[in-house]
Amino acid sequence: MKLELRGITKAFGPLVANDHIDLTVEPGQIHALLGENGAGKSTLMNVLYGLHQPDAGEILIDDEPVTFSGPGDAVAAGIGMVHQHFMLVPVFTVAESVALGYEPVGSLGLINTGAAAAKVTEISRRFGFDVDPHALIEDLPVGVQQRVEIIKALARDAKVLILDEPTAVLTPQETDELITIMRELKASGTSIVFITHKLREIREVADTITVIRRGRVVGTAEPTASAAELAGLMVGHDVSLTVDKPPAEPGDGGLALEGISLVEDGAVLLEDIDLHVRAGEILAIAGVQGNGQTELSEVILGLRAPTTGSIAFDGQEVTRHTVRRRLRAGLGFVPEDRATDGMVAELSVAENMVLDRYDDPSLGRGPSLSPTRVRHAAHRMREEFDVRVTDVDDAISTLSGGNQQKAILARELSRPLKVLVASQPTRGLDVGSIEFVHQRIVAERDTGTAVLIISSELDEIYALADRIAVMYRGRIVGTVPADTARDALGLMMAGTPAEQALDPQEQTR
């Protein structure tokens, strides 16, 4: 089935998310849609899947114009979509999940669960998915849940499959398995629209690449193009994809966690975590999201009190300190969700830059801040951190995601630190902003700060880390050198103990 988008335009108020986009997906083709978060990729796919109505343009299937009033129409036309966040019911079986909304029924109108299970088995065998139709969704690893989503689409005779950031929650091994599945689907004649911002994966599997920037198609590329070329197309200028950093020179002190456990409502969220980040080094925590990384960062900040264990900055016990006392003790904190936890959208850029310094004598006297001093400090940080803003009195919500993140970094790094915790520091940023953020994090390390990075992006971890700790289900399964092989790291992210994952004999089994 040939799929064509012509002149697709979609605006939300003054924001033009898609601006006259043309895209053609040939039968049996893996067509990659490349662009940073916010470029308009997901909006375009939501138009294609009937979730949004285009303001202009048309969709053609086999050269015939079609109109979709909702996802049901798109499914009927042969289009399936696997969303970044899976649409599965945890307590359902695989067969029930696949049948949901399109239940096969018998003569009495009763759901034919046997027919649903047979469909799952047939598709699994055809593509080598190895999925048990009777297994509960909640008992399945994330990679297998994704296969269930693909089976759902194929069970409804999808000829074009949209995969929206499909590797965001996968281990490296699960990513490799998905790439194999994509190739098998292509060989069977299924077309795939592969939406991603990960250059490594796109070059490995795509037949052709369309690059979107700020809602427009800015070019096409072949998978033979270099990562640097693709990155340049994404952001509009040349960027460096590597972090030039000298070897760490770790010293004494830093961040020490001993025996940290967290139990809430009977659930063990963190289990007996021992972690030492030395002064002047970057320790990166790798792991698929949802394995306790968020809870760990909140325990360090003081938003959650550990059930057991102790926390120290440079030998100073802070376990029972408030958030404010920890910040004053030399903690810098960059939260994973900047919009919710890192800034107040309605306040100005200047005000956000001093949010956690309201009692700093250099910014005012007594209980009041001096607007003049605040603006002066903001202008200084704006220059140092390249925050691109018309006026520091503008609301921070008017800035791009990259500039919002720079403003938050400026706030946290503009005071002497002993410990910096940065969670998903470059999420949603373009390649140019990523380059800048990485440089500032390394510079902070080189001043002697103990830096803890929490990231779901392995490329980021390899770029920044001096050592790598891996989390799985609330535990540290091992701490390894920064040059540890990706395969071994992937095994650890799936729960394999470090000594076993690093054993060459284990990796060949």
Image (spheres, helix red, strand yellow):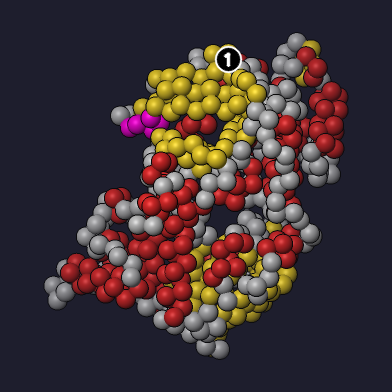
Residue situated in front as seen by the camera: 390 or 485: 485
What is the magenta range? 267-271
Residue 113 lies left or right of residue 2; in this view the side is: left
Q: Is residue 486 above or below residue 422?
A: below
Q: Residue at x 47, y 59 (%)?
A: 175
Q: Residue lying farthest left?
A: 108
Dominant SS type (magenta): strand
Q: Is residue 342 magenta?
A: no
Q: Is residue 269 above or below residue 505?
A: above
State the image quarter where residue 237 is shown.
bottom right
Disc 1 residue type (three-letter) = Gly
Q: Residue lying farthest front?
A: 505
> Label 1 crowding class (10 Å Cα cut-off): few <14, some 14-19, many 20+?
few
**Which structural element holds mark 1?**
loop
Residue 305 lies left or right of residue 444; in this view the side is: left
Q: Residue at x 53, y 60 (%)?
A: 165
Where residue 507 sits: x, y (%)? 40, 54
Where residue 401 sits: x, y (%)? 68, 47
Q: Residue at x 39, y 67 (%)?
A: 150
Residue beneath disc 1: 315
Where residue 233 sits: x, y (%)? 73, 65
Residue situated in front as seen by the camera: 176 or 160: 176
Q: Is residue 233 above or below residue 123?
A: above
For the C terminus, the quadrant is: bottom left
